[in-house]
Image (cartoon, rainbow, N blue to C red):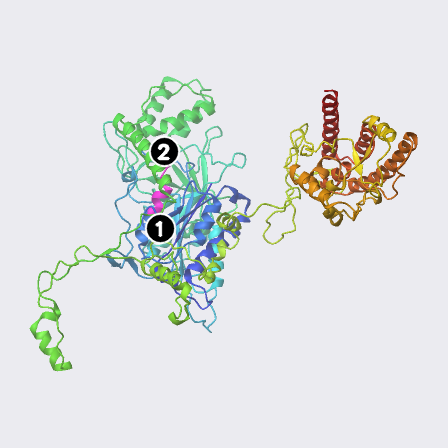
Amino acid sequence: MPVLLFLVDTSASMNQRSHLGTTYLDIAKGAVETFMKLRGRDPASRGDRYMLVNFEDFPCGIKAGWKESHATFMTELRNLQATGLTPIGQSLRTAFDLLNLNRLVTGIDNYGQGRNPFFLEPAIIIAITDGNKLTSGSGIQEELHLPLTTPLPGSELTKEPFRWDQRLFALVLRIPGISSVEPEPLGGVPPDDSPITPMCEVTGGRSYSVFSQRMLNQCLESLVQKIQSGVVINFEKTGPDPTPLEDCQNEPVKSGLQPWHCCHKLIYVRPNPKTGVPIGHWPVPEAFWPDQNSPTLPPRSAHPHVRFSCVDAEPMVIDKVPFDKYELEPSPLTQYILERKAPHCCWQVFVCNSAKYSDLGQPFGYLKASTALSCVNLFVMPYNYPVLLPLLDDLIKVHKFKPTIKWRQSFENYLKTMPPYYIGPLRKALRIMGAPNLLADNMEYGLSYSVVSYLKKLSQQTKIEYDRLIALIGKKPPPDAGIKVRWRGGGGLSLAQRRDFTQQLLSVTGVVPTLPMELNAKEFQGFHLAQFTFSRKPQPFRNPYDISRNQLLDQLSRMRRNLIKTSACSFTGHDADQLHSVPIAQMGNYQDFLKAAPQPLRDPDPEQPKRLHTFGNPFKLDKKGMMIDEADEFVTGPQNKGKRPVESNNIQGGGPKRRRCMSPLLRLGRAYTPPVSPPASPRPTSDMDVIDGASESDLIINHLNDNHYSPEETSDSEPDQPSGLIHHQENHVDEDPQDHRHGDEEEEENGGHLEDELDMDSGGGVVFLDDQTPRFLSPEALKKHIHTETMKVNNELRALITKEIRKPGRHYERIFHFLKQIQGTLETRLIFLQNIIKEAARFKKRVLIEQLENFLEEIHNRATNMNHLDAL
């Protein structure tokens, strides 16, 4: 899992513009995004980890570390601003410490136990800078120096701040401000001469001098190819040069130091294709012999110095003894070995001071060209393999894994010359061979108790430092109080108070400045200058004569805000121009705008399906919680099955809310119609007895005094009202005015809400028939006439209610308005309601069915209560 750390220069010089019209910082941001796109084409990029560091002070310079996500990385990259100095040494040290933060926790460096190439965490640092002077708080530096002090525990165990699997590459932007007419040089991108170049070469990387956008893209493609899993090793020649081969006898022998004598290159550590993790067996020896009595470990160099001897030797490999093979990166050394065309010869490699009694040490492997002469491989074998491999070969072929005493003596003599940290790998190799009992279990590994305890303590401290740094990343630095004004007078007089300066000024200008005689040198001792806040943009001023009188206070607040720049002020009415001055990255942040907006008013129709604020598509419906209640009818929100909906106009139980009738004339089950004309004479007592003696269920229409009829109802009649329910106003001209006064008083006693009572209780108001019955009818004729008129009205109501049921939506108010106007006996109305429920069931109106059932139940209850009252 390679780590890709981008070190972006955020000094003020990155604000310079190229001939493309963009600043260097914009070019750097685009280069990072382009690199990530190129790297994303490789399937192996799924395990990449991206980090971002800029030139700010620690820990504010770490923008994305071990825990930050890819989205955080991109956000911090876009928010970078070029405002500071160029402390590239401190920033590089911060980058290396960030990479080395958890190496002691995982034990990947394996201090004092040999260097394992297969224990690695490959990292590439890509620095993007303009290559200008290295400026810091102490001044301008000519060379790049990394700070020696670091808060990272265990840093003293390695001489350099980097490790052998970390490489530094630098993209130095040299794009001119004016486009050049000269053609770009062909070939590779040359290295830059900035101070960061030596640092790149020390780590095994290089720098690129970028003069155009095309060269920048070429460098990015080259960097993508350099993301390889491997470690850097210093190869140095020891001893004489090799003898020329027969094919090269006529070539002149070059004297002096050759490029292939010392190479600082990478060896590729290929991961296992099955597990994706590199697998190895043998380490590279340490440059010291471990002493069990030593209380500390000597510091190691970041890259091991491996010396190779040019004496040709025979490559040795035994079938059952494991070995490691690593391919070398192309270099002058690999080119020289391949030009010799000797695939059957090898050069042994050594690490100085790795043996107990030898300065050069014993061989631990060899360099050998591949059989096809396509590459050069480093074979890592057991330490002093020319002695061990013949012994193991005899053990397998001669002794058949039953060693003799002489063989054991030879094997013990070899163990004395082998570093103790090879015991663990050798025990694993013998177990693979089938001889696990050759090494005793109590053999020491070479580290003292104090060293082991010190390494454990360092691991715990590094874990604490890791957690502390993770918590610090992303926190804003505390605001600086300001720039402190220091007195530099030293107690003497200022230049303006010196006599010679005054005389010279008088001779030149002829005017002597008037200065106070006494100046307090410590008057401004605690004075601080406020620092400029880059995040707060100044608001444009206006012509003072253009400011209206009602905006003077707002303009004063704006001026105070521009002067202090410490707190935001709320303005009203004058910064509409600033409302649209929003960065591009924040233009789509519609949710924050909604949070700051005032609370909207209540929806006038809560039953209407709500629409989403979709920022560009206001006609998009909310699909969450939407289900089909019927054909072409959408029901939004959660559906409460088995529960009756409680609406704002319904009482408990789901039925429509009704106001109790206060008038004894307006009872449930009765409808009234006024007479066609006032009676000329009193009705006969026999007829009155017949009508009054009729049962409540049979008597549907009674005469209603015109005092209970409001003439305003005629103008508010429904357009879909059935013809039998149209209200007709009767003008009783010949009535006595006292009757009118009596009616008004009676209306006031009933609360003045007769219209509402007629609508809510008696089923839609007063019923006036077109064809009034004769004044004197027999009971049978009256019943027949009433039944005919009732059927006529109910049929029209049925048609209107069926029409409303078929309409989509949940607007059921008109249906219940018509249901209140049903005529007939209690049984007739119940049958009518049951037929309406069946009609609603045909269209699967579940909510309407529940409300109709509640309405039916309420009619039953009201009828029962009225019967009890009548019985009393």
Q: Is residue 781 visible?
A: yes
Q: Which residue corresponds to the image point at 66% horizontal and 43% vertical from the top-left?
A: 609
Q: Which residue corresponds to the image point at 47% horizontal and 20% vertical from the top-left?
A: 400
Q: Is residue 233 above or below residue 850?
A: below
Give the image location of residue 339, x and y in percent: 45, 52
SS under mark 2:
helix
> Magenta span has 807?
no
Q: Which of the image's four quarters has the C terminus?
A: top right
Q: Which residue corresponds to the image point at 9% horizontal and 61% vertical from the top-left?
A: 491
Neighbours of disc 2 within 10 Å: few (<14), some (14-19), many (20+): some
Direction from residue 36 to residue 311 in the image, left or right? left
Viewer-nearest of discs 2 and 1: 2
Q: How far apart in space, not on screen, are marks 2 and 1 (Cα)? A: 37 Å
Q: Amino acid at mark 2?
A: Val
Q: Is residue 215 above or below residue 646?
A: below
Lower position in the chain sequence, tag 2 or tag 1: 2
Q: Is residue 174 visible?
A: no
Is disc 2 in contact with disc 1, using a CB cutoff of under 8 Å?
A: no
The quadrant in which residue 83 appears is bottom left
SS under mark 1:
helix
Give the extent of the magenta segment: 94-108
Q: Amino acid at mark 1?
A: His
Q: Which residue is mark 2?
A: 105
Q: Which mark is residue 30?
A: none
Give the image location of residue 762, x and y in percent: 75, 35
Give the image location of residue 321, x and y in percent: 45, 29
Q: Which residue is mark 1?
A: 261
The quadrant in which residue 783 appears is top right
Name the dominant secondary structure of the magenta segment: helix
Direction from residue 732 to residue 424 in the image, left or right? left
